Image (tube, rainbow, N blue to C red):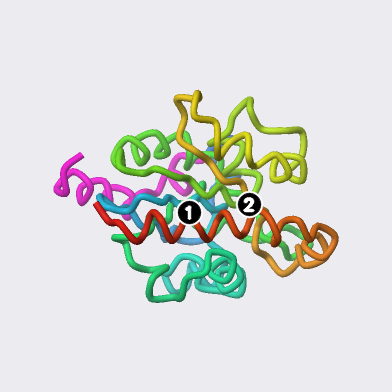
Amino acid sequence: MADDGLETLRREIALCRICRDRPRGGMAHRLPHEPRPVAVLSGTARILIAGQAPGLRVHETGLPFNDASGDRLRQWMGVDREAFYDPDRFAIVPMGFCFPGYNSQGHDLPPRRECAPAWRDRVIAAMPQIELVLAVGQYAQAWHLGSRRKRTLDETVRHWREYCNDVESPALPVLPLPHPSWRNTGWLKKNPWFEQELLSVLREEVDRLCSSPL
């Protein structure tokens, strides 16, 4: 898609209100606040960061991963904020574009079910230059890996080599990551291989794909 087509798609996403006006399950399940879609599309970035859904701070600022989780993700990738928010280097498109609200325990709800079916295929088709998907969390992994995903997120991340190095697959290479939430600190401590093995490859790929722009 040409730049004008990408810009049209950006405008359409910014105006999207399906979770308020046509929610799955009827109006009783509509988004309880005004939508504010957050997504960074790019015609040049070779890496797509596929996250979950914006949190409250991202909803308020309109800047993806503008929170402690984003700080940890940038540390994993070995990039600073300036590089991370450079659309020539990274496209950032979560599974749900809008903050979904909180559950009764005060935790973020899952991405809205209306969003990915309405937009995901169009967004991916609009960015044919993407060479690597960073699938952050179970919802992104479910969409981008499909039946190749393992039974649990832990298993999926442990088998990351299957998705990143499968040269025979017609699908884009995918590097599955746990969510960088600080709630996962315990998991990271129990799985030192993640930093020792996976993160070294992640940083190498980020450096390779960002050092030679299209």
- Up-down relation of residue 202 to residue 165 (above or below): below
Q: Residues within 10 Å of mark 1 (few under 14, many from 20)?
A: some
Range covered by the magenta-colored residues: 1-23
Compared with residue 185, is residue 110 higher up or lower down, i.e. above or below? above
Does any portion of residue 11 appear in the rendered image?
Answer: no
> Residue 205: which numbered mark, if any?
1
Label 2 sits on a secondary structure element that is: strand
Tell me if I can see residue 71 in this picture: yes
Q: Earlier in the sequence, mark 2 or mark 1?
A: 2
Q: Nearer the viewer, mark 2 or mark 1?
A: 1
Query: At 29% across and 40% down in the image, what residue appears?
Result: 126
**Which secondary structure lies at badge 1?**
helix
- Rendered image quadrant of residue 211: bottom left
Judge whether residue 11 is colored magenta.
Answer: yes
Q: Is residue 163 left or right of residue 46?
A: right
Q: Tag count in the figure?
A: 2
Q: Quadrant of residue 128?
A: top left
| Rendered location of residue 31, percent (x, y) | 53, 52
Q: Residue 97 at what x, y percent from top left?
A: 46, 53
